Each structure stands twice: as structure tokens, then as C-alpha cells.
Amino acid sequence: MSTVFEPVIGIEVHAQLKTKSKLFCACSTQFGNATNGNVCPVCLGLPGALPVLNKAAVEMAIKAGLALNCTVKHNSVFSRKNYFYPDLPKGYQISQFDLPICENGHLDIVVDGQPKRIGITRIHMEEDAGKLLHQGSDSIAGADYSLVDLNRASVPLIEIVSEPDIRSAKEARAYMESLKLIVQHLEICDGNLEEGSLRADANISIRPQGQEKFGTRTEIKNINSFRSLERAILGEIDRQTDIINGGGSITQQTRNYDDNTQTTTPLRDKEESHDYRYFPEPDLMPLVITDEKIKSIKETMDELPADKAQRYISELGLTEKEAKTIISDHIVTVYFDKCIALDGIPAKELSNWVLGDLLALSKENKQTLDQCKVTPEKLIELLQLKESGKISGKIAKDILQKVFNSGESPKTLVEKEGASQISDSGELQGVVDQILSENQDVVEKVKAGKTKSADFLMGQVMKATRGRAKPDLVKTMILDTISRL
């Protein structure tokens, strides 16, 4: 009988900070610039070039620490992490080792309705390495050769290291998704997994259920999607289980995950900290952070996603589902908050339009809300026209489509197309009379007490007025007119 194993998982998340310049020099961090265009003597590691610490990056790291319930250390130190790799021009990485900027935090997640607290061991600052561009294959496996792009070298990162508290691939995904939301809401990282600005390394081991001692772990590097994280962990758990059930043992090593085959392959034996020969960076002073600095940063922080969702529910009257849907996408959250700040439209109504018609249009046209032409100001203008009775709900939907396509003002479009709602009974009476005269059989049904048949007549009036007639007024006029016949 095979042993039942329990996975033990820890996640190291690298988040690229949204600074305009690199961690130790003034080079741009802009993604997509010409290959090897964002470089200088400092990030290329040329002799005599000295690093200068980016203040904005330090403040962002502190924000992350506060958001994740960490202790922000008053004194931290940068160290040299020595290893050789083609995309590491200096032959070492400036990182933090025994004295990181933040320690001892936690993040609460919910999986299948059950809350779980994941410990945060540390958050440390470091510079990124460059990027290898593998030629002849989608990954390092099977590549003919690799080219080096050093634009990313010395881009500022924070590494968020969890405790080995995660017990399933689903928990790992929930943890990663929660971290992404937090760094996006703090506006310290754009959270773009495809561009590599948020990526994860998963440390995985298994042990017989009930055993306290950890098994031998492997590390899967640079996973850049939630789906890949889940698949890589599940695949590695299966691999380790098969080996141990077959009488083998796990080798501690770093492995590469291939999403096409959903398998991991060995890259190298897993290093220990002494292999990197850490020592304090001689060209940088220890980093000193005062209580006053921590307090001032805390006062400027925006509310966290979970707090914002709760406020949407308690103060704005949204449902839990609506609130969670809004905060699950930072771009949608920013758009919705801008609409709320403009005032005049109930939050529930706004939520229906943003999460319904507007998001549907955006997805259909492969745009995000910050890219579409329906700005918060234009959406509020449109809904105010509807709320005031100048246009009907149906016309509002038609105008929304036209604003999305053209970017024109809703008021301008309503005036240009003569789409304002007809609410003058004198103007509508002639249309009502005409429809009744053309549908005498339906009129007789209404007279006989089948008032539901009036909906057909109402539809005909709306069609004749191209949706401009005020619906509740039309129905009242139809019933009043028939009652007098």
C-alpha cells in the first residue's frame, strides 16, 4: 500500500518595483526598450562604477512590509551574493542576506471558504539580473544558444519569502493572487506576470502525513502565471511521490518548469547560502530607517484590497460578490473609485454598468478600462442622462457603445441623434392612438381584463418612437386610453 504524503510548500515571490530608474543607477526601467539600451557602467558592473541606492525603491519596500504585517527593521545591510551566470554582468548580485529590510509578517488567504494564515519570513531588496533570450526553443530546454539582454540588470526587486506553511497547489495560487492584488493596490509593482515583473519560485517537498520533519525540497524557478504555478506544484508533487513510492530518494536541486509538457527538469543542484559567499557590500552604507519615516509612509498608504472590499459592502451597499469582483482587477478598482469620486450615481448602479456592459465591451474589444474611450467622466455623464429621464435604459446602452467607439460626449451624441426620451404625454398621445387603432384585437383582450396584453402594445409604441418614449408613461397612457374606449 502506497504512503499518503503531505506537500510542504514555500513561495519566494520577486516583485519588480515601479520606480522610473534602477536600484543603483539612473538607467530607465522601462519595459520593451531596445535590447541593451537601458544600461550604463554601474549596471554593467564596469570597474570603478559605484552604486547609489534608489530612495523610492526603499519606500516601496517599506510599504510592502507594512501591508504584509512585517516588522520594518531600523537597520538593514546590502550584501554581495556571489555566483556566475551569463546574465549577471558583475559576477555577483547586490542583495540582502542576514539583515533584510522587513521580517516576521503574514498574509491571510481564503481557500474554498476556509481562512488560512501564511507566514512571511522576510522581505529583502535586491537588484534583478539580466535576461537570457533562448534561441531555437521556447525555453532553455532544447535551445541552440542564448543571447543576453541586460536592460533588466539592476532593476529594483523585493523578494517576499513565505514560511513553508502552504499545503496545496490551490493554496499556493491563492497566496500568489493575493500578493499580486496587494502590490498593485499599493502601486509599487504592476503585477504583470507576462512581462516578468512578478514571478515566483516554489520550494516543494513531501512528507508522510503526520510526520513533522520536512522532506528534501526542490525549487522550481521563475514561474510566471498562476496556472503554471498550480500545474508545476502538482506535477512536482506527483514526481516526488512516484520516486519515494518506488524506493528512491529526492535530490535537492533547482528545476525548470515547462508549461507545454507540464513537467520539471533539473537545472542544477540546489545551492545553500554558504555557496554564495555572502559578505556586506563594501560600496554601500548600512540602510537606516527611522520610526518617523515608517510612520510617514504608513500615513500615505492606500487601503488594502480586503479593507476596500469591506468598505464597498458596508458603506456603498455592494454585495460581497460585486466587491470582490471589483477589487480582483486593480484597473477596474481604480476606474470604479474614480466614478464614485465624481458622485451623483448610486454605487450599486455604477457597479452594474461597470461590471456588466462596460467590461463586456472592453473584453470584446481586447481593451482594459484604462485604455477605453469611456472615461469615468463620460460614464457618469451618460448615467446622469438616464437617471434624469432624458434617455431610457435601452438608449443608454446604445449610446455607451457609440461613446466606446468614438469617444464623443454622451450629451453630444444624444443631441446629434435626437435620442432624448419623450416624456411629453401630448407628444406621445398620437402615437398611442395610432398603435391602438392598428391592433384592435389586442385592445379587446385588454378590455376583457388581460392587462398583460398591454405589454405588446407598449412594445409597438417603443418601436415606433425608436425607444425614445418613457416606458412607464407609455404603459399608463395605453391603459388610460383603452379604459375610455
Image (cartoon, rainbow, N blue to C red):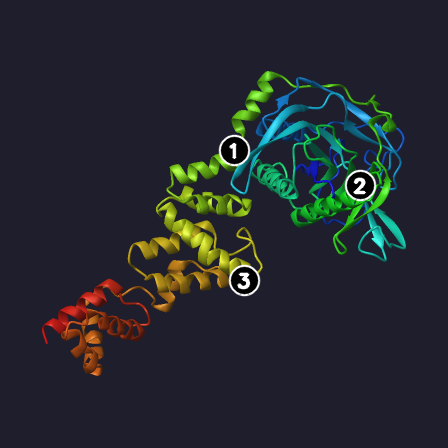
Mark 1 element type: loop
* Amino acid type assigned to the residue bearing label 1 in the image: Asp
- Seen in the picture, residue 373 relative to 424 is either above or below; the reply is above
Q: Position of residue 257 (x, y in %)?
A: 77, 48
Q: Position of residue 368 (x, y in %)?
A: 56, 53
Q: Position of residue 10 (x, y in %)?
A: 70, 34
Disc assigned to residue 244:
2
Residue highlighted by disc 3: 364
* Amino acid type assigned to the residue bearing label 3 in the image: Glu
Query: Which quarter shows the C terminus?
Result: bottom left
Residue highlighted by disc 1: 302
| Marks 3/1: CA–CA distance | 31 Å
Q: Position of residue 242 (x, y in %)?
A: 78, 46
- Seen in the picture, residue 271 relative to 149 is either above or below; the reply is above
CB under 8 Å between discs 2 and 1: no
Of the two numbered discs 2 and 1 in the rendering, the one whose residue sits closer to the viewer: 2
- Mark earlier in primary sequence (3, 2): 2
**Disc 1: CA contacts within 10 A as few (<14), some (14-19) or many (>=20):** some
Q: Nearer the viewer, residue 234 or 392?
A: 234
In-image side of 1 versus 276 (left or right): left
**Residue 284 visible in rendering:** yes
Query: Which quarter shows the N terminus?
Result: top right
- Mark earlier in primary sequence (3, 1): 1
Q: Nearer the viewer, residue 392 or 261?
A: 261
In-image side of 300 versus 441 (left or right): right
- Mark earlier in primary sequence (2, 1): 2
Q: Residue at 77% of width from left, 37% of height from top?
A: 128
* Amino acid type assigned to the residue bearing label 2 in the image: Ile
**Disc 3: CA contacts within 10 A as few (<14), some (14-19) or many (>=20):** few
Which residue ends up furthest to the left in the rendered image? 484
Q: Residue 292 falls in which quadrant of the image?
A: top right
**Residue 11 visible in rendering:** no
